[in-house]
Amino acid sequence: MMKPRIVLKVGSSNISNGEMIDEGKLAHIAGLINELRTRYDVLLVSSGAVASGYTRLKIDKSLLPNKQALASIGQPLLMQTYRARFQEYGIEVSQILLTKNNFDSRTQTKCAKDCIDTLLAHNILPIINENDSTALTEFVGDNDRLSAYVAHYFDAQLLVILSDIDGYFDKNPALDSNAKIRPQVERIDPAELEAPHTPNAKFATGGIVTKLMAAHFLLERNRAMFLTNGNKLEVLHALLLEGKQTNGTLFGSLPVAIEQQSVQNS
């Protein structure tokens, strides 16, 4: 029986301490992925290449050529770090670098999906990132929307975005202490997709708006997304391995295949 497929997107804030990759944070994520793989096929979309590159070359990342250079330096460093962490669990990893152009061609999309399918069939963990060194289209630096494309075009039942916020609030929690998390959202107001991007971490590039764009993309295609805090991995553990939503925001409805797996042996 085939396992349900999920995409887990990890932001820079989840694996970086603001200056370099945080080995402790990454180790916790690797441990959770190891557990999730007992019930799910997991695709990991990871930011962090620019942060990794910055540890070796301190240049202004706000300039596009500099950012591309940092990504070029940092991508192999990031993969080296992931490989070391996952080897502790006997998990082999692979690297896939994509741009928006890969999703604009049916031939390229099918080629990428065939590769993903083959890797998963052989129990390899695909680690996906944008090819920041050459990408010039709208994905640049925005792995939230890239992960939504990956979830849709590569047939995942659920996208999980780990962020530095607990979920999607009814008000801005930074401005209103009475803000409350919306546990489930079925529709996103178009006006909410036009707000300024407000990333919190030094190496982050999106903020809540790009996450809403990702959710909107998937909702329009009858797919689901879960937004939760990457520093509170117990929330994702509870949802996917215990069948309990203790926090976070679910966009859409949890697919039946995910529900069945989440309550298995819980």
Image (cartoon, rainbow, N blue to C red):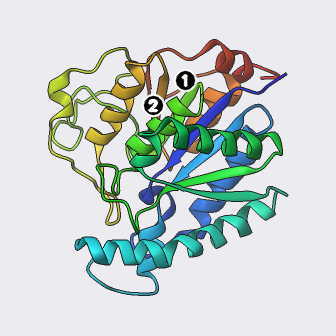
Front in this rendered view, residue 6 or 15: 6
What residue did someone put label 1 on?
Answer: 245
Mark 1 Cα-neighbour bin, 10 Å: few <14, some 14–19, many ≥20: some
Q: What residue is pinned by disc 2?
A: 248
Q: Residue at x 49, y 22 (%)?
A: 224
Does residue 162 sit above or below 60 in this rendering?
above
Image quadrant containing the N terminus: top right
Q: Is residue 148 left or right of residue 94?
A: left
Image vertical order of residue 76 relative to residue 125, above or below: below
Q: Position of residue 226 (x, y in %)?
A: 48, 30
Q: Position of residue 31 (x, y in %)?
A: 71, 52
Identify which residue is drawn at 24% across, 38% down: 173
Residue farthest to the bottom, as pictured = 57
Residue 54 occupies which quadrant of the picture?
bottom left
Closer to us: 230 or 4: 4
Dot 2 amino acid type = Gly
Spot occupied by residue 113 in the image (x, y as percentages of width and height): 62, 39
Left or right, 265 with reference to 76: right
Q: Amino acid at mark 1?
A: Gln
| Residue 64 seen in this snapshot | yes
Q: Are marks 2 and 1 in contact (CB under 8 Å)?
A: yes
- State how far apart marks 2 and 1 are (Cα): 7 Å
For label 2, the crowd category at 10 Å Cα-Cα, with few meaning under 14, some 14 to 19 and many 20 or more, is many
> Can the viewer see residue 17 in this picture?
no
Asked if residue 158 lies left or right of residue 144, the reply is right
Quarter assignment of residue 90: bottom right
Left or right, residue 137 beside residue 231: left
Residue 176 locus on image (x, y percent): 17, 36
What secondary structure is marked by label 1? loop
